Image: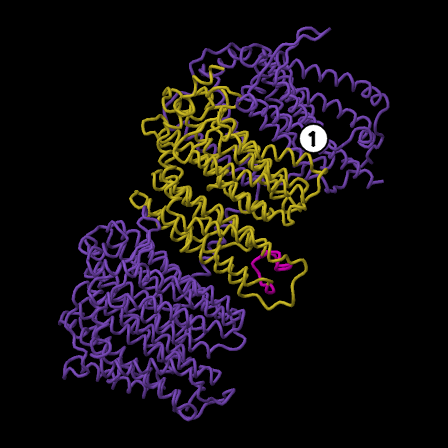
Chain colours: A yellow, B purple
Amino acid sequence: MNHLVFLPVLVPLLAGALLLLVRRALPLTVRRRLNLVAVLVQVAVALALLLQVTDGTVLVYQLGDWPAPYGIVLVADRLSAWMVLLTAVLALFALLYAIRGSDAGSRHFQPLFQLQLFGLSGAFLTGDLFNLFVFFEVLLLASYGLLLHGGGAQRTRAGLHFVVVNLVGSTLFLFAAGTLYGVAGTLNMADLAGKLATLDPADLGLARTGALLLFVVFALKAALFPFYLWLPTAYAATSAPVAALFAVMTKVGVYAILRVQTLWFDDPEGSLAGLLDPWLLPLALVTMALGSLGALASTRLRIQIGYLVLVSLGLLLTAIALGERDSIAAGLYYLAHTTLATGAFYLLAEGIARRRGSAGERLIDAPAMPHAGQIGALFFIVAILVAGLPPFSGFLGKFMVLRAALDTPAMAWILAVVLLSGLLAIVALARSGSLLLLRATPSEGLPPGAPGRGELAPASALLAVCLGLTLWAAPLTDFTRATAEQLLTPTHYIEAVLGTDMEGAGR
Amino acid sequence: MLECCDPINASHSQRLIMNLTLVVLVPFLGAALTGWVSRYGRLRSAWMAGAVTALALACLLPSLPVPFTGEPLIQRLPWMPGLGLDLVFRLDGLGLLFAMMILGIGLLVIIYARYYLDADDCMGRFYAYLLLFMGSMLGIVLAENLILLLMFWELTSLSSFLLISYWRHRQDARQGARMALTVTGLGGLALLGGFLLLGEIAGSYELSVILASGEAIRAHPLYSPMLVLVLLGAFTKSAQFPFHFWLPRAMAAPTPVSAYLHSATMVKAGIFLLARLFPALSGTPLWSVLVMSAGLATLLIGAWIALFKHDLKGLLAYSTVSHLGLITLLFGIGTPLAAVAGVFHIINHATFKASLFMAAGIIDHECGTRDMRRINGLWHFMPYTATLAMVASASMAGVPLFNGFLSKEMFFAEAANFFDLSTWSWVLPVTVVIASALAVAYSLRFIHDVFFNGEPHDLQRTPHEPPHWMKVPVEILVAICLLVGIFPGFTVEPLLAVAADSVLQCNSPAHDLAIWHGFNSAFAMSVIALLGGLLIYAARRPLFMIAARHEGLIDAGVLFGRTQQAVIGAARAVTTAFDTGSLQRLVALLLIGALGLGAVGLLGVSAPLTGTATLVPADGISLIVALGLGAGAIATTVLHRQRFTALIVVGVLGLLIALIFAKFSAPDLALTQLSVEVVTIVLLLLALYFLPQHTPAESSRVRRVRDLGLAAIAGLGTTALAWGILTRPGATISGYFLDNSVPGGGGSNVVNVILVDFRGFDTLGEITVLALAGLGIYAMLKGLRLPGMTLDPSGRPWNWDLHPTIMAALTRLLLPLALLVSAFIFLRGHNQPGGGFIAGLITAVALIMQYLTNGVEWTHRRLHGNMHPVIASGLLVGTLTGMASFVFGHPFLTSTFSHVHWPLVGDFELASAMAFDLGVYLVVVGSTLLILIHLGLMRSAATQERD
C-alpha cells in the first residue's frame, strides 16, 4: 500500500492537531517554525506525489483497507496531484507572509491554517462523494475561523454571510448526495460513474436532480453566477495571508465541477450525458462579464481583486465547459496561474493598504507611500498577470483557452466576452494603479507602523513563481494536456478504483 | 516562405546563432541594468542606455547583409512548440528598416534626453522605461510569429503608459497615459482576436506561412471579421480616425518620448502591421474601403486640426496623425507603387518629425512655454536651431529638395492614378490636395509664428541656443532629410527597395526617386498644394476665428471620456443592482438556483417520481408524530419573533425526531439525536440571553411573500425528493456493511462500525469539523463584550436569584453517575447502541449541568476551563490510532480486534476502533464544553458589568 497518497492529508492533520496541543506550551516563534516545516514537508510530499502520477498512474488508497466502493478511497491522478501541489505552494508563501507578524492577532492561526490545508488536500484527493462533503465542511469551518482571524465588525459580518450561505450549500450537498445514493446505491465517485451511466430510465429524473443540485453546490463554491456575491466581500474582509490562501478555495469548486463533468457527464452514451452543458458555459461567461464590471465599479482595492478573481473563474469555467482536451489543458494551466497571481495580489494589497495611513485600501487620494518604487513595480507586474496581458502566464493561459475555443459554436460569444472583459480589467487596473501609485501627493515621512520592505518578499516570490510558469510553459502545458487526456478517458480512473476489489476483499 | 533550407540562409543561421533574439532581449536586460546604475549617478544611466542601444545595434550588424540576399533570416528558439508559439524572429527588408529606425533614432533620443531632463527628474527610471519600450518595439518588427508579435505589441502599450505618465504628478500625464493604454489596449485585444482567427485560417501563426497563403486567407469565410479585428488593432495603435484622439493627449509625455514613440516608432507599429500583412490581407474591396476611408479621414482631420493648435506639440501631434493617415491611405490604395510610397514616407516622416519634436522640445526648454501665441521671433535668439527646424518643416510641407517632397510626389501620383472618371473617384485626389495644402499651411505657421512674426510675449526667461549636444541629434536627422531629399538614389534607395520587396513579397515595381519627373499630374498637385497652403496661411485669421468658435464642439477625446464615464456608471449600476451586500438575497438566489435546476432535472425527462416499492401502511403513532412535526414546524415559523418560545418548539421537534428514529429501529440515531438536542438547546438558550426577547419585524410585505413562496416551494421540492427516494427499493451497498460488520469490523452494532471503521475517515473529518466549530466560536466570543439584559420585555428587573440549592446539590451527586453512564455507553458502543460520540455528549451534558446549577465561576474553579488540549489530544488520538496500522503495513485506520478475558467482567472484546472512538469522545467533550464555557463566561462578564 502506497502511503504517499495519504500523506498530503495526514501531514497537515497531524501538524494541525499538534499545533493546537502546544498552543500555550511553546512560544510563538517555535510554533511558526513548526508550521513552516509542516508546510515544507507538504510541498515535498505533494511534489513526490506528482512525480509518481506523471506517467499516468492512478494511485488508490483504501482507508481502513476496505475495498471500494464500500470503504472510502483516496485517489491520486494527475489532476488531484496538480491541485495538491498548487495548494501547498500557495500555502507556503501565504505562511511566509503570515509569520512575519500578521498571525499574531489570532488565537488559532497556526492550527487553523494546517487544518485548512487538511481540508483542501482531502477535497482534492478523495474519491468518495460523502467524504467530499466532509472535507467541504472542514474547509468551511476552517476558513470561517481564518476569516474571522484578526476580528472586527466587518470581518464578523462578512464571516456570517460566508458561513450562512455555505451552510445552506452544505444542506443542498446532503440532499444531492442522498438523492444520488438513493438512485445509484453508492457514494464512491468511480462507482457512481458506472451506475449513473446505466440508469433505469424511471430513475433518470431523480438522478438528474441530484446531479444538478450537486452542481449548484459546486457552483456556489466556485462563485459562479448567480452564486458569486459572497466572494468579493468575504475575501476583502479577511487578512492578507488568509485571502491569499483563499485564492485556492474557489478552485475546490472548480475542481469538483471538472471532476464530475469528466467522470459522470462526459460519456456520450451515458444516461446523464451533457447534463451541465446548457448551464456551465453561459453562466461562466456571465460571471466573467459581471466580474469585469464589478472590478471597474469597485471603490476598494481588495473588492476589485475579488471581482477580478471572478473574471478569472469565468475564464477557467469556460475552459472546462468547452470540454475539449486542449481547453481543459489550457484551463488547468490558467488555474495554476490565476491562483498564484491572485494570492500575490492579495498579499501586495495589504502591503499597499498598510502604507497609506488612514486611506488604507480605499481608492481615494492619499499621501505617497514608502517603497513606492518597489510597490509600483510589483503592482505593475501583478496587474499585467491578472489582466492577462503579455508576456506572462496570464496571457498564455488566456491565449490557450481562446485558441481552444476557436472551432466551437460559441466562439464569437467567448471571444467577445473574454476580450471585452479583458479590456475592462485593464481599464480598472489602470485606474486603481494610477490612483494608488501615480496620483499620490508627496508625503511627509513614513506613516506610523509602516512595514518594512521584507514584507513584500512573499508577494515577489509568488510573482517569480508565475514567471516560472511562463518560462516553463511548454513542459507544464504538456503535463496539463496529459492531465486533460486522462480526465477525458475516465475508464482508467474507474478501473483503478474499482478494479482493486479482489485485493481488498482478501483481508 | 520557409526557406530555412536555403544554403545562404542556413549558413547564416549557424554562424549567427541567436543574434536576433539578442537584439530584442538586450534592451530588456539593459533596462534593469540602467535602472540599477542610476543609483550611482544619474548620468551613468544615460551612458548605460546609450551603451545598451549600441550593443543591440552591434548584435544586429552581422545580419545586416542577409535581407539584401532576398531571403528573410529566421531564427528559432523553442518555447511552446505545441501551441505554435516559439521565440522565432525574422529579419527581412521591412524588419531591417524598422529596426534601424528604432535603434538609430533611439540612440539620438537618448543623447537628446540626457540634456532635456531636469535635474529633479529621475533619469534612471526614464531610460529604463525607454529601453523597455525599445525592446518591445524591436520585438514587434522582428517577430516571425504573430502571437509573439502581439506580445511585444502589448508591451509597447504598457511601456508607453509608463513613459507618458513619467511626470506622474501631472494630471494630464496620468490621464493621457490611461487614455493611450485604454485605446491601444482595446486595439491589442482586438488584434489578439484577429490573430487567433488568422492563425485558424492559415493554420499557423508564422509569417512565412501566412504571407505565402494570401489567396486562401482572402477567400476564407472568416476573412471579414478577422480583417476588422486586425485593422482595429492597427488603427488604434497608429491613431487613425476615429481613434486618433489619444495621440495628442499623449503629448503630456516628456518631449523625447513624443519624438521617439509618438512620431517615429510606436505609432508606426500599426502601419508596420499593415505593411507586414499587406501581401496576405490586402487586395479585397473590404480592405480598400476600410483602410482608405480611415486613412483619408485621418489625413484630412489631422491636418485641419493641426492648423489651429496653438500648442507647438499639439500642432506636431495632429500633423503626425495626419501623416499617419497619409501612409495608411497609401496602403489602402493597395497598388505596389503605393506601398513603396508608403514605406518611403515612413522613413521620411520619422526623420523630419522626430527632428521637429526635438526642436519643439528645445524651444519649450528655452522659453518655458509651447504656446505659439507667446513664442515669436525666436530667429534672433536661436538662429541655428531655427534653421534646423525650418529645414524639417519644409520637408514636412513637401517642399522640393527635402525628403518629404519625394514621397509626397509619389503619393500624389498614386492619388491621381486613382482618378478614373467614375462618379466618386475625384474625391480622393481632391481631398489629398486639400490636406496637403493644409499641411503646407501648418508648416508655414510653425516656421513663421515661432521664428518670426514679431517679438516673444512675456516669456519667463530669455531664450538662447541650447547645449551643443542637444542639437546634434537634430542636426543628424535634418542632414538625413536633406541627403535623402537631394540624393535619394545614393542614400535611401537600397534600403527602400529591400523593404518594399519584403512588403510586397516580390520584387518591387520600378520606381524612380528622381526629384524632377516632368510636368505631370503629381507635379501639378504639388504646386496647387504649395500655393493653396500659402493662401490658407494668409487667410488664417478668419479661419482661426471660425475654429475658435467651434472649438471642442466635436472632440473625440471628450467623447471618449464621456463614454468611459458612462461605462463606469453602468458598471456601478449593474454591480450594485446585484451586489447589495444582503445575506437574504444571497440565500434567496442560492435557493432559486437550486429549485430551478432541481426542477429542470426532475421535469426535464419523463420519468415517474414515485418508485416501485410497495408502501407500508400508515400506523397511528407515525401519523401522530408526523402531524406533530408539521404542527411544530409551522409553530416555529409563526412564533419565530418570540425567540424563547420558538426555541422550545424547536426542542420539541428534535425530541419527536428522536422518537421517529426509535420507532424505525435506529436506537443509535435516537440516542445521538437526543443528546445533540439537549446540548444544542442549552447552547442556544445561553446565546439567547444576549439577544432581545423578540425579533423585530424588519422585512417588507413583498419580501415576506417572496420568502413564503420560496420556503413553500423548497418544502415541496424536498418532499418530492424524499418521496422519490423512499418509494424506490434501492439496491445499495448497505448489504456489504451488514455482512462484514462482525467478521471484518469486530462489532455487531453496524452503525458504530460504519462510524469508526468502514467510514472512520469521515468521522475523523467530522470531529475535525466539530473541533473547528468549537475553536471558531471560541475565537468569536473571546474578547467580545455584549451588554446583558437587565429588564425583561414587560420592564420588570431580571431575577438574579441563581443556582437553586437543592438542584445544585443534586447535580453534584449525579455527576459521577452520569460519567459512569457515559463510560458504559462508550464501552458497549461497538456492539450495542452507543459509542464515543454519544458518550461524549452525555459527559458534556453532565458537566453542563454543573455549570448551569452551580454557576460558571464555581465550576470553573474546580474544572480547568482550558479545553484546547482536550480537543487537540482527541484529534491526535484519532489520528495516531489510524496511523498504528502503518506499522503492520496496512492503510490508515485499518482496524483489528481481539477478545480478552478480564477477571470479574468476563470475556471482553478490545477493538482498535475503540481507541479511535476515544478520540471522538475527547473532541466532542472538549468542543462542546469550550463553546459552553465561553458563552457562560461572557454571560457572567455581562452580569458583573451590571453589578
| Residue B885 location (% of width, % of height) | 57, 22
What range is drawn magenta here?
A: A352-368
| Residue B858 location (% of width, % of height) | 83, 30
Q: Residue at x 72, y 42 (%)?
A: B784
How many numbered dots are placed on residues in this image? 1
- Is any part of residue B333 visible from this angle? no
Q: Main secondary structure of the magenta part?
A: loop
> Does A208 lie within the magenta span?
no
| Residue A446 location (% of width, % of height) | 65, 63
Nearer the observer, A329 or B19: B19
Q: Secondary structure at mark 1?
A: helix
Up-down relation of residue B715 to residue B462 (above or below): above
- Is any part of residue B451 visible from this angle? yes
Nearer the observer, B361 or A364: B361
Q: Quadrant of residue B654?
A: top right
Nearer the observer, B331 or B652: B331
Q: From the image, which quarter does the C terminus of chain B lie in?
A: top right
Q: Residue at x 38, y 74 (%)?
A: B107
Up-down relation of residue B368 to residue A429 (above or below): below
In the image, taking residue A150 as reference, residue A285 lies left or right, namely: left
> Does A358 lie within the magenta span?
yes
Q: Quadrant of residue A485?
A: top left
| Residue A423 location (% of width, % of height) | 41, 56
Residue density around tag 1, few if under 14, some if 14–19, many if 20 or more, within 10 Å: some
In the image, taking residue A95 as reference, residue B335 lies left or right, namely: left
Q: In this figure, which residue is indicated by the disc labeled 1?
A: B684
Nearer the observer, B629 or A96: A96
In the image, taking residue A162 as reference, residue B927 lies left or right, namely: right
Chain at numbered mark 1: B
Q: What's the amino acid at mark 1?
A: Leu
